[in-house]
Image (cartoon, grey):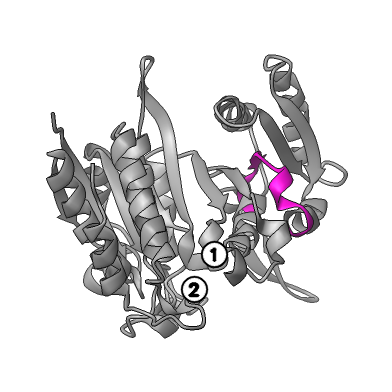
Amino acid sequence: MGISASLVLLPGDGVGPEIVDATKPVISAIQSAFGHAFATQELLIGGAAIDAYGIPFRAEDLEACKASDAVLLGAIGGPKWDDPNAKTRPELGLLALRKGMELFANLRPVSVMPALVNTSPVKAEIVTGVDMMIVRELTGGLYFGRPRRKWLERRGRAALDTLIYREYEVDRIVRLAFDLARGRRSKVASVDKANVIETSRLWRTIVNEIAAGYPDVEVEHVLVDAMTMRLIKGPAKFDVIVTENMFGDILTDEASVLAGSIGLLPSASIGKARGKDDLRWRGMFEPIHGSAPHMTGTGRANPTGTILSFALLLRLSLGLEAEAVAVERAVQETIEAGIRTPDIVEAGMTAVTTAAFGDEVASRIRL
């Protein structure tokens, strides 16, 4: 029996509208195949909202997102709004969305499809078998610390950002990582810079305290600079990686290279579960890449990350596991059939457009 759900679509900037449009046929195909009714509402965020309203995200649009069952985002930003002296920037809309919806955890699954092993810039024998989940803390750390300011002093310009973490912020993200590991291969790698930074020493202390309550989960501590090397030299060894906001921002982009294209990977930003016995989350789902302004309007953008983000939405926010698997299977079958966007096309294949790829995935949705 089908369900009813409300979804907010935030296409955003650059290729965002194109990759969200390419996902719409997949959304429709899931509704038809499984008998669901998804009410979708499309709103502005980022540069598009600045152009329309003068601000990157309106309060009333945030309320609409909070009232929905889940949010699917395209991309935010672009050179049009890159003036460092501008009063507001598109990215502030994304921060407001995360903060307003209390989305404290960013989940980024990184795996390499067997059909795409040879498209990765990393050797095939290294990326074969990669299947990790990177858990990034999302609402604390350097990006949200106060005070932050710029000033002029005798020797020139200066600027200040504050890196702060509180115990509850570390506790909740680390516990989530350990819980996720129990459903996977029971291994957690905690990434910090405890040899230098005080917040990292607090982070490591709390991880050790929590680990004592998970004797079935293997835990290791990895300094962030060492992790940048190990992600390339031996990525298949990792299961769940948990880290703070800025480190996670950097490491997840590095890890995306393993899959062969930054356009392939999805992400989920989630907060608290809906209830004690209801492990569905209201969340925001988006591909990990940016707005790719150089691709805007060319039909060359890869919508795979957005389509797979919709699969995460089905699984995590709506509790629809079979439907999520149907989307993931359709994506894999499309790619295995040699139907690919230019970033992952191989010799002897003909690249398809962003929209055509979405249509091909939708045509493969089945029970």
Mark nearer the N terminus (1 vs 2)? 1
Q: Name the residue under label 2.
A: 344
Q: Is residue 142 visible?
A: no
How crowded pointer 1 is (Cα within 10 Å; few <14, some 14-19, many 20+) is rated as: many
Amino acid type, mark 2:
Ile
- Residue 104 % position (x, y): 49, 38
For residue 174, what is the image quadrant? top right
- Report the disc number at residue 116: 1
- Identify the magenta region: 232-246
- Three-letter amino acid code of the residue under disc 1: Leu
Residue under the point 23% across and 47% down: 366
Disc 1 and disc 2 in contact, CB within 8 angstroms:
yes
Q: Where is residue 219 in the image (x, y as percent from the top left)?
A: 75, 29
- Which quadrant of the structure image shows residue 232? bottom right
Disc 1 to disc 2, how far (Cα)? 8 Å
Judge from the rendering whether residue 283 lies leftward or rightward of residue 195; answer left or right: left
Residue 102 percent coordinates (x, y): 41, 37
Relative placement, left or right, of 53 versus 232 is left
Q: Quadrant of the N terminus?
A: top left
- Tell me, for residue 1, which label it has, or none: none
Q: At numbered mark 2, what does the secondary structure look like: helix, strand or loop?
A: helix
Q: Which residue is drawn at 72% across and 38% down?
A: 189
- SS type, badge 1: helix
338 shown above or below 208: below
Name the image quarter holding the C terminus.
Answer: top left
Q: Position of residue 61 (x, y in %)?
A: 23, 51
